[in-house]
Each structure stands twice: as structure tokens, then as C-alpha cells.
Amino acid sequence: KNEVEQSPQNLTAQEGEFITINCSYSVGISALHWLQQHPGGGIVSLFMLSSGKKKHGRLIATINIQEKHSSLHITASHPRDSAVYICAVRNTGNQFYFGTGTSLTVIP
Amino acid sequence: DTAVSQTPKYLVTQMGNDKSIKCEQNLGHDTMYWYKQDSKKFLKIMFSYNNKELIINETVPNRFSPKSPDKAHLNLHINSLELGDSAVYFCASSQSIGGNYGYTFGSGTRLTVV
């Protein structure tokens, strides 16, 4: 079993929809990352969280340390949001664990 | 100026060869990483260096040897390449290993072993 589980694995949405991607983890962490990998392969670091909530433009990331769960929300989704979103956690021993990614397609 | 640059972008080589991938960051970050993304798109960390010192060394064959001549560079040398080494290798950097610092990734090196 993977230490980091993401859901859903694949997601198709209509432009404008509100999107939620979930990440659950089983290890104690010092930080959680949300990464975006574009169809061309490039990876962008979206957020790093250790508590609470962060917002950047139309993207919001939340984390609940007690429940070992994080969500990535995209408001007013757009076709350019189509990408693979990867959740990764770093434990207190600086070991990294990655989710298998959520492939998002936003249809115009 | 590219913040984290990797060379080459593509590398096709025969089994048994030795090859290197170079990574440089101009962000003044202390920590650099190598990640491997396999054919199923699963990311896995391989190594991390902080100020030229190896701090993370995951279970990776010892054919893979990272070298950090200074904190702006982290190169990956691979000996006796095998078919299973075919993957995309990403370099990344962050201000520090700890704390709430984001990562900056290079654009990846697609290695194909034939």
C-alpha cells in the first residue's frame, strides 16, 4: 500500500466547474506538497503546506494534520488547468513519499 | 535565465554505457534533488544534497552516483546502464531541506536505454 493515496485517479470536468482532488497519507509529516505536471512533462510546485490553508489565484490547498488529509481545490476551472496533480509528503526524517497523481482534463 | 537547468534534455544510449546528467540552479538554494519518473509516471526521490552534503540516499542501485561540486550543481552519473533505467529524471532545488520552502524543478531529462 502506498503511503500517499490520491483520489480520484482521473477526473474530467467542464470548464467553469469547481474541482477537488484529495490526498490521504499514512505517515507523520513535516510538510505536504502539491505539484502540477503539464502534458509537456514540466513539473511546477504549487503549494507546500504544514498546516491550515493556502491560496494562489484560483487554487486553494488545505491540510488537516489530525485526519492526515489534504485537498487541492480549483475554482472556475479552465482547459489550461488540464494536467496531472501530484501530492507528495516529507516526513520528519526527510523521506519523501509521492502519490500516483490525479489526471485532470477540463473540457471547454 | 532558467532557474534550474538540466542537460541534456534527451539522452538515448546503449545498454552498458556510462552517462551523466548535469543540473545547475541559479536561485542560491542550499538543497538540490534528483527524482526519477518511471513509465507509469510515478515520481520517486533518489538523492538530495544540502550544501554539497548528501542527506538523502534512497534505495538506488550503486550504479547511480550523484556528485555536487558546489551547492549550485548536482550531477548524476550512471554506470553500466540497464534497460530499466529508462525514465525521465528531474532535478529540483529548494531553499532548504526543512521548513516551508517550495521546490523549483528542472524540465527533465528523458533517458532511453536501448
Image (spheres, rainbow, N blue to C red):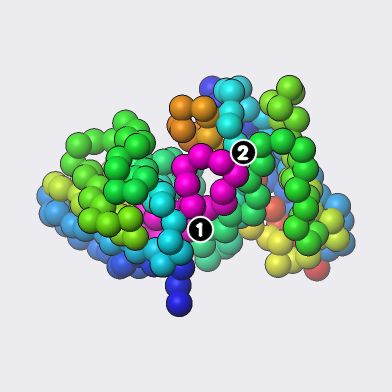
Disc 2 and disc 1: Cα gap in Å? 15 Å
Q: In this figure, which residue is indicated by the disc labeled 2?
A: A32
Q: Chain of mark 2?
A: A
Q: Residue at x 30, y 40 (%)?
A: B54
- Note whether residue A29 is visible: yes
Q: Quadrant of residue B99?
A: top right
Residue B56 horizontal/vertical position (percent): 36, 36
Q: Residues within 10 Å of mark 2 (few under 14, many from 20)?
A: many
The amino acid sitting under disc 1 is Thr
Q: Nearer the viewer, residue A6 or B69?
A: B69
Residue B10 horizontal/vertical position (percent): 32, 66
Q: In this figure, which residue is indicated by the disc labeled 1?
A: B104
Q: Quadrant of the C terminus of chain B?
A: bottom left
Q: Chain of mark 1?
A: B
Q: Are marks 2 and 1 on the same chain?
A: no
- Note whether residue A85 is visible: no
The amino acid sitting under disc 2 is Leu
Residue A45 horizontal/vertical position (percent): 58, 54
Classify mark 1: helix, strand or loop: strand
Indicate yes or no whether the magenta region holds residue A15.
Answer: no
User: Which residues make up the magenta segment?
Assistant: B88-114
